[in-house]
């Protein structure tokens, strides 16, 4: 089961956020990534950690998953709208400055691949399987 969390209009450029997001490897456990993000000196680690905590809370409250079983499937950093500012330079002219914003999407998945509903255990497929080929 996939659990998502989104943060929009973050006041940090997407390039700076992607540097930190690449350090958190795919299939990294969610709790280990929070420990890593709390220790790095970059400012862009804070909104990324906040979004991961939000995704963990969504999983625990909505689908009754254990936080230890959650893995990060994907972290997506998209560009948001940018604010145009101007900086005065020589001879009465101005250069434009783009203040960039970002949108963060974090997708978590259960590590075991099994989901309990009532007394039944359901197998959750993470990848699409090809249909079986039969005789024609």
Image (cartoon, grey):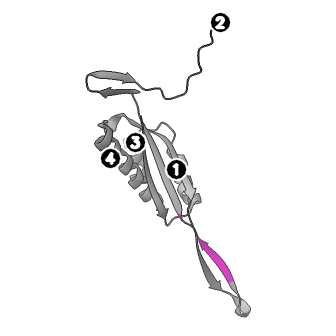
Circle 4 or circle 1, nearest the eye: 4
The residue sitting at the bottom extreme is: 92
Q: Which mark is residue 57?
A: 4
Work out how far the residue at label 3 is from the one at label 4, CA to CA, in angstroms.
Answer: 11 Å
The residue at 42%/58% (across/down) is 46
Q: What is the x, y in percent for residue 63?
A: 32, 38
**Does any portion of residue 42 appear in the rendered image?**
no
Mark with earlier residue (2, 1): 1
Pointer 2 local density, CA inside 10 Å: few below 14, some 14–19, many at least 20: few
Please give the residue where the numbered disc 2 appears in the rendered image: 135
Mark with earlier residue (2, 3): 3
Circle 2 or circle 3, nearest the eye: 2
- Does the magenta run of residues contain 37? no
Work out how far the residue at label 1 is from the one at label 3, CA to CA, in angstroms.
Answer: 13 Å
- Local SS, label 1: helix
Mark with earlier residue (1, 3): 1
- 29 horizontally vs 67: left or right: right
Please give the residue where the numbered disc 1 appears in the rendered image: 21
What span is colored magenta in the figure? Answer: 95-101
- Quarter of the picture holding the N terminus: top left
Q: Is label 1 in contact with label 3 (beta carbons under 8 Å)?
A: no
Circle 2 or circle 4, nearest the eye: 2
């Amino acid at each position: 089961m996939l659990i998502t969390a989104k943060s929009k209009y973050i006041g940090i450029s997407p390039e700076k956020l992607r540097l930190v997001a690449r350090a958190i490897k795919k299939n990294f456990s969610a709790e280990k990534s929070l420990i890593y993000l709390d220790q790095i000196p970059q400012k862009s680690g804070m909104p990324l950690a906040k979004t991961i905590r939000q995704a963990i809370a969504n999983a625990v409250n909505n689908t009754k998953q254990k936080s230890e079983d959650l893995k990060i499937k994907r972290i997506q950093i998209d560009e948001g709208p940018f604010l145009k500012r101007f900086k005065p330079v020589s001879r009465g002219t101005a250069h434009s400055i783009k203040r960039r914003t970002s949108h963060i999407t974090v997708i978590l998945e259960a590590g075991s691949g099994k989901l309990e509903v009532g007394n039944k255990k359901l197998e959750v497929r993470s990848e699409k399987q090809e249909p079986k080929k039969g005789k024609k």
